[in-house]
Image (cartoon, rainbow, N blue to C red):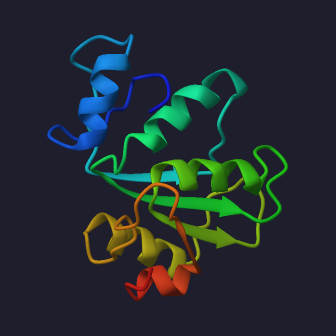
Amino acid sequence: MAATGALRPARGTAAAEATEEAATAPAEPALRAGALLLFGSAVPGPFREAMAALAAAGPPGFRALHVLGARDAVNPPEGAREVAEALGGCVLEHPGGHDLPSDPSSVLAYAEFLAGEASAGDATPGQASRTSPEEVAAGHS
């Protein structure tokens, strides 16, 4: 979504200023997120340059939690790691495939992240951290 311009960095951030000029999307995108949960993400080939430009622009101004499955055959984990490196944030890796973990520790990790209790999005692009669901739930990133 960020690569296509549908999702933009928060206003007032260096990333927002850098991408506003280069964007071909409408001046007022529909969504400016404060926190993102991304599940099994990947960068489609045509958007690799846009994702690289977003990463080079600096912190996007939102927290991100990247949830990826170690055995994801739809979007292999390497793709989700690439998105995490570009956007920054925290990587929560589970042993499953292309699914949404709903075990108690994962659900707690999502809730605490969305409540702002886990500092999972403090990393800058290119510095995504790797944590388990338990570490995110405990606020360690």
Q: In which quarter of the image is residue 103?
A: bottom right
| Side of 92 relative to 121 (left or right) | right
Classify 19 as above or below 33: above
Q: Which percent across, then down, holds residue 122?
A: 34, 67
Q: Which residue is drawn at 21% across and 43% down?
A: 13
Q: Which residue is drawn at 37% across and 64% down?
A: 121
| Side of 98 relative to 137 (left or right) | right
Q: Which residue is drawn at 35% across and 69% down?
A: 113
Q: Which percent across, then down, holds residue 60?
A: 33, 46
Q: Quadrant of residue 95?
A: bottom right
Q: Which residue is drawn at 40% across and 70% down?
A: 120
Q: Which of 12 and 112 is in front in this view?
A: 12
Q: Which percent across, then down, holds residue 124?
A: 40, 60
Q: Which quarter of the rendered picture does the C terminus lie within?
A: bottom left
Q: Which percent across, then down, holds residue 18?
A: 31, 31
Classify 139 as above or below 62: below
Q: Nearer the viewer, residue 114 or 54?
A: 54
